[in-house]
Amino acid sequence: MSADSGYSAHDVAEVLSRLSAVVDARQIQAPVGAQDLQAWWAAVAEVAGDGTCGLDANTLQYVKGVYDYIEKVIISCGTPDAFDVYEVCFETLTKVGFFLKFPPAKEGLLHLLEEVHEVFDVLLSCIETYEWVQPGATGLLRLWMLQVVFACFDYKQIQGRDLMELTDNDICGAVSLIAFLLRCPQAPFDMQAAAGRCLMQLTTADSVFLARQESGEELQSQQIAKLTGLLNRHVNGLIKGLIQFEVVDAFGHCICQHQMSHARTDTIVKYFLSTVHNCLLYCSENQRKLRQHLAVQSTIIQDIMIPYVHNILPALYDNPACGPGLQEWQNLKSVLQTFVVVTFNINVFRPQLRDSDLLPKIFDVPGILSHISMIELLIKAAVNVDYARGPYFENLTARLQAAFEALPEDQRMRLQRRLTSEQSTRLPMSRSSSQAMEAIAFALTPPTGMEGESPEAVALRQQHREYEQSLVQDKGGQKKKLMNMQSSEADDAAAMAAGTTGQDDDDCADMPPLISADGWQADLGAMNEIGVPTRAICPLSGTLMHDPVATPDGCMFDRASLEDWMQFYSTNPLTGVPLTMSECVQALEVQNFIQNYQLQMLSACMIAPEAFDEPPPPLCEAPAAAAAPPPMGPQSLLGDLPTLGSERQERTKKDKGKIKIESRSVVDCPDDMRCAIDGKVMTMPLRSPYGHCFEKKTLEKWIGNCGSTCPITSQPLRLEDCQLDSEMKKRIVRFLKGQA
């Protein structure tokens, strides 16, 4: 157990004293007095020593007496706003649970949680609502409630799907808890790291499907449409939660809190990068809102991520033999992957990467220009930031060309193939800067023999690639992820192993072909050679469209790519006719088709992995070298508690279920109570002269970043032109209090 969570017998005695005082102040009927409670614990502390010593039967009865006292207080409290009572109760349980490390004490704590699980569940579901109405009203209750769970099970055993069970499969509730832990300075680092890891796991399809497999449901007996619907709701709720609970900002707080420790910063940054990277790869309207959120309301890229790269570069410079087996190398690769995705979608980040010396410094990392996966990322990052307009254009072009020419012939062909074909399954690259594209034309030319390939040649090349992949699987044990999703610890361990054995991570980067989905041809066109609908691909970027827009003559482009194009040209990229962005309209129906196609592929991979090149890895599983965690009950996180995701059994006669507020009620509020910029519930609504309502702080950030322009109408708008909508504020307060 982490030293951060180590508590002494004295700590427990002190919190027991506070518990007795709170019980007396609230006039709660307690089974024994404060003196008896302290005497029981003194007897336990005398025998337990540092907490590792076993207890005899008589001393265990004293521990049981303490647990019974706390159980009685929790059940007898019965008032929805007695957060001070609940907080000190769960703080006591946490400190006892971490201090007494032998199994009988853990079993007693689990039994207590079983007895109070209804109060536990209901409290978790309502805390966020109370915090919205009155920030700070619940204190550190969530911290202690979750630490009790970690006191029963090791930090590494808690997975993202366990948090989903804990919140009754409410994805917004799970994201809310994670954001709280990341932002809470009192949370132990191991707990914050576990929260970041769980969030990263929740961004993948495995958090939905593996939980169903563990509960005994057979995925192959489910209709793919049903599974796709489950994943659709999960993904949309997840991204809404990231925006609603300001998770990106919470990661920033956590990184700053641990900035003096490189090891801790590496861990939190890895989970942050994977979370953002994965969410930006989903094709949905909510993904567009996330891009807007990152651009308008977050400075973590420029304030946290760029300085982080500068911090890890010295460790790479000092190791001439650095490669995929080095943690800093893996983190740098994750940073570059995230930069590629972010700069493709959000142009506000491009000048900071283009005009700084960050890219030239990354080029100086020993050996980085000999790995084609890294060269691919550096080329895409350079093109996406339009490096031709920056001060290092000639230098970077010369170094990229020299690195390309230094590669063996087969490696050059593989790099060219990665940059020119199958773009829909790779990280996106902008094609709007003609100067940048011309400068690296040497890498963007299809390999000799690939121009105008016949179907037979394509099939033959596909079979050859499948054979190569089977060899790679046998050598390194690495598996591939659909849609370029980032990996968990299991995949990191495999990458580290590959590095130590001398295997290049480049060998495992090719995407497997996707299986066809029935019925998409009518809406998205016929499948290409790798099973991707042709109308789902942007003609400019060659990738799946995340935010498709339609021109007046019916052409479809991804909004980000077309906006980049329009910076240089005022014509349709395909037809050459004059065009402005104001003439283009959002193709919401096509966007929904693309999202459903993407999620259907992830669902199909779970049902029939044999239809792909090789089965996808369970991204949430523990590293192979780690011992399997002990069973935690049939289907539940808290020992033998009922499954939180299933229908409740009949409640007992104990009055434990009075609080019935779902945390998602805050998210599911009327649309007119949401800010027109980010869709979040407003607390200080400002109404513009054009009739739109904005949250004050959000509008201030918009004007600060984008100028005095209305985000909705693009008409001139100053902050002083807007008025506080008092009636709307009263309505919001009444709504929130009504939910409480």
Image (cartoon, grey):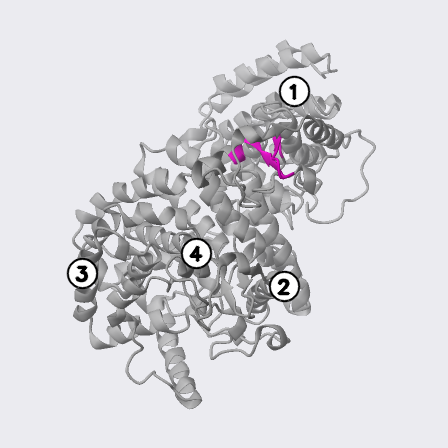
SS type, badge 3: helix
Callouts 1 and 2 close, C-beta under 8 Å: no
642 falls in the magenta region: no
Give whichever of 309, 608 is nearer the camera. Answer: 309
Instruction: Give me the residue at 47% from left, 24% from top.
Output: 7
Callouts 2 and 4 close, C-beta under 8 Å: no
Q: Earlier in the sequence, mark 4 or mark 1?
A: 1
Q: Earlier in the sequence, mark 1 or mark 2?
A: 1
Instruction: Give me the residue at 61% from left, 16% from top.
Output: 19
**Mark 1: amino acid:** Val
SS type, badge 2: helix
- Cα distance, mark 2 to mark 3? 44 Å
Which residue in the protein does label 2 denote?
589
Q: Which mark is residue 486?
A: 4
The region drawn magenta spans 682-699
Relative side of 380 to 161, left or right:
left
**Mark 3: amino acid:** Arg
Instruction: Give me the residue at 35% from left, 43% from top.
Output: 305
Quarter holding the C terminus is: top right
Dot 2 alpha-carbon crowd within 10 angstroms: few under 14, some 14 to 19, many 20 or more:
few
Give whichever of 208, 667 is nearer the camera. Answer: 667
Which residue in the protein does label 1 denote?
85
Callouts 3 and 1 close, C-beta under 8 Å: no
**Mark 2: amino acid:** Glu
Q: Quadrant of residue 76?
A: top right
Which residue in the protein does label 3 denote?
399
Q: In the rendering, at what x and y percent does residue 687 appear?
A: 63, 33
Dot 4 alpha-carbon crowd within 10 angstroms: few under 14, some 14 to 19, many 20 or more:
many
- Cα distance, mark 3 to mark 4? 28 Å
Q: In the rendering, at what x and y percent does residue 215 appear?
A: 65, 56
Q: Earlier in the sequence, mark 2 or mark 4?
A: 4
- Cα distance, mark 1 to mark 2? 51 Å
